[in-house]
Amino acid sequence: MSSGFTLDIAGLALALTAEADLPIEAEGSARKFVRAPGAAGPAPFARLHTRWGEPSVPASAPLGFDSGKGLWRMYRGPGGPEFVFTSAALGPAPYQAAAFNDAFTEGQVTLRRASFADRLPIYPLHYPLDEVFMVHLLARELGVELHGAGVVTPDGRGWLFVGQSGAGKTTLSKLWRGEAGVRVLSDERIIVRREAGELWMYGTPWHGDGYIAEPGRAPVERVFLLRHGLENALAAVPRAQAAARLFACAFVPFHDAAGLAFSLALLDDLVVSRPCEELAFLPDRRVLEFLRR
């Protein structure tokens, strides 16, 4: 248990703290992204503090957006965006709220004690707050999260396999994971960022059915748009179509015009500057040799 720790995700340090009587720690694959005590690293880019309280629904109307699953809604608070989380299993009252400044670099998470007192310690960024927060932070001209698997070749090149659920990301990830010298950063979620003129892909804590989630990064060399096929084949994809297919696999804040514009521009940059092809494949090791050729 800890009263504070730092997560390093996609090159961004996230400092998490809490009240003295609210023990917190990472859970699941997020544990791999916790900075070791005393380890060197960049200064925190964002700081989130967690406290006990009585989360409530703001009097203002939602910001034109509903998650569609009844899990969270977004509002405009006095200091910036606010998110309110409810669950049928925990009753009608919100079990959690999170308020941020407009840059998403400072935030406060409020937990209803009755909902969490028997679940200590708590991971302050438990689902769905983790991805809700990260998607909005990245949209501040930092990057974009994709439905993708990230493979790093033995010589350090990054191959990005993008597709919706069921397209084959986990199947390919498991095949690549058995190859000597190959690293698989994720079988489900990859973050792409431009840094110092280079496009990088990062592993994330959010995995698919293969439970593959590893910290690390690699420069993006190739992008593959996945579909199942009767044979292993690559096909060129027109730029506009490639960008549209990437956008369909992106996690973007549709209610945020500036963030949406940035995400679209970054994806367009990706298809312009990197080979982007459709990969039809058979789910066995022959596809690995096909791609190597």
Image (cartoon, grey):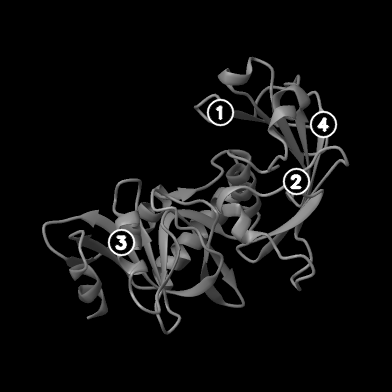
Please tell me whether mark 1 or mark 4 is closer to you in this view. Answer: 4
- CB atoms at circles 4 and 2 under 8 Å apart? no
Q: Earlier in the sequence, mark 1 or mark 4?
A: 4
Q: Residue reaching furthest bottom?
A: 155
Q: Which residue is mark 2?
A: 102
Name the amino acid type tagged 1. Answer: Asp
Name the amino acid type tagged 2. Answer: Asp
Q: Earlier in the sequence, mark 3 or mark 2?
A: 2
Q: Which residue is mark 3?
A: 172
Q: What is the CA distance from the residue labelled 1 to the residue labelled 4?
A: 25 Å
Name the amino acid type tagged 4. Answer: Trp
Q: Where does residue 171 sit, x and y in percent of width and height?
A: 30, 57
Q: What is the CA distance from the residue labelled 1 to the residue labelled 3?
A: 33 Å
Do we see residue 55 in this rendering?
A: no
Q: Which residue is mark 1?
A: 66
Location of residue 222 by image quarter: bottom left
Q: Which residue is mark 4?
A: 52
Q: Earlier in the sequence, mark 3 or mark 4?
A: 4
In this rendering, position of residue 64 left or right of residue 155: right
Q: What is the CA distance from the residue labelled 3 to the residue labelled 2?
A: 38 Å
Q: Earlier in the sequence, mark 2 or mark 1?
A: 1
Location of residue 50 by image quarter: top right
